[in-house]
Amino acid sequence: MAEVKIAVETRTEFGKGAARRIRRDNKVPGVLYGHGSDPLHLTLPGHELLLALRTSNVLIALDIDGKTNELAIPKSVQRDPIKGFLEHVDLQLVTRGETVSVEIPVQAEGELAPGGFLLEYVLDALPVEAEATHIPQQVTVSVAGLEAGASVLAKDIALPSGVKLDVEGDTVVLQVVSAQAEEAPAGGDEASEA
């Protein structure tokens, strides 16, 4: 599991105007919450946060105002819908040894059986419970040789030691479907006779 250190500042200004000023300085407003404590409003360096968020479920070691060190995982990230830059981040406070609920990406590997089948991701991320400092980056599922109608259930996925499903075992994660045949052109043979 990747752990990234980021120096952050507490913030006392709130609202749209304050958030715009923070973003203009290439920083991101955020909130740290959890463990029954009051939410802590933060200003995070935009570029460092963007790099950290490239890793799913990254563990972030926060150096708050140079005084306090806390561990957190991203829970919600808001991006500008057009430009894609970070607008806000919610961070969940965690401690070493604590079990947290997260979603880990599902990666399929292998070739489906011949015949024009398609692989459909019903869940692209698998809900699990894991120790905060040992969250897997992803789970890999073999789909080699699967044919139409086959599916991979949550309970069929091998999880690393210490990681438990946080969803029913019979939940479909991946399924194989037949490729749709192309529809005949409207009008059929009549159009070619004209």
Image (cartoon, grey):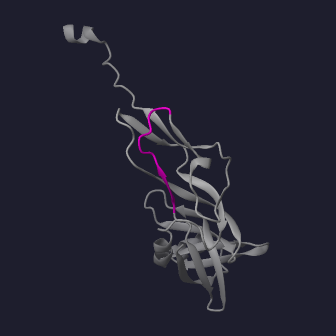
Q: Is residue 94 left or right of residue 105?
A: right
User: Residue 174: x percent and y percent?
Assistant: 52, 43
The one of 145 and 34 positioned closer to us in this rendering: 145
Residue 190: quarter of image: top left
The residue shown at (50%, 36%) is 150
The residue shown at (37%, 45%) is 111
Vertical position of residue 151 compared to residue 182: above or below: below
Residue most extreme to the right:
36
Q: Is residue 51 left or right of residue 16?
A: left
Residue 88: quarter of image: bottom right
User: Residue 106: x percent and y percent?
Assistant: 51, 54
The residue shown at (66%, 46%) is 169
The one of 87 and 89 positioned closer to us in this rendering: 89
User: Residue 130: x percent and y percent?
Assistant: 65, 65
The residue shown at (55%, 47%) is 123
User: Residue 115: x percent and y percent?
Assistant: 35, 32
- Is residue 140 in the magenta section? yes
Q: Say if residue 189 shows up in the picture.
A: yes
Region rendered in magenta: 138-149
Q: Is residue 176 left or right of residue 172?
A: left
Residue 163: quarter of image: bottom right
Vertical position of residue 41 compared to residue 157: above or below: below
The one of 55 and 170 positioned closer to us in this rendering: 170
Quadrant (top left/top right/bottom left/bottom right) for the N terminus = bottom right
Residue most extreme to the bottom:
67
Q: Main secondary structure of the magenta part?
A: loop
- Is residue 111 in the magenta section? no
Quadrant (top left/top right/bottom left/bottom right) for the C terminus = top left
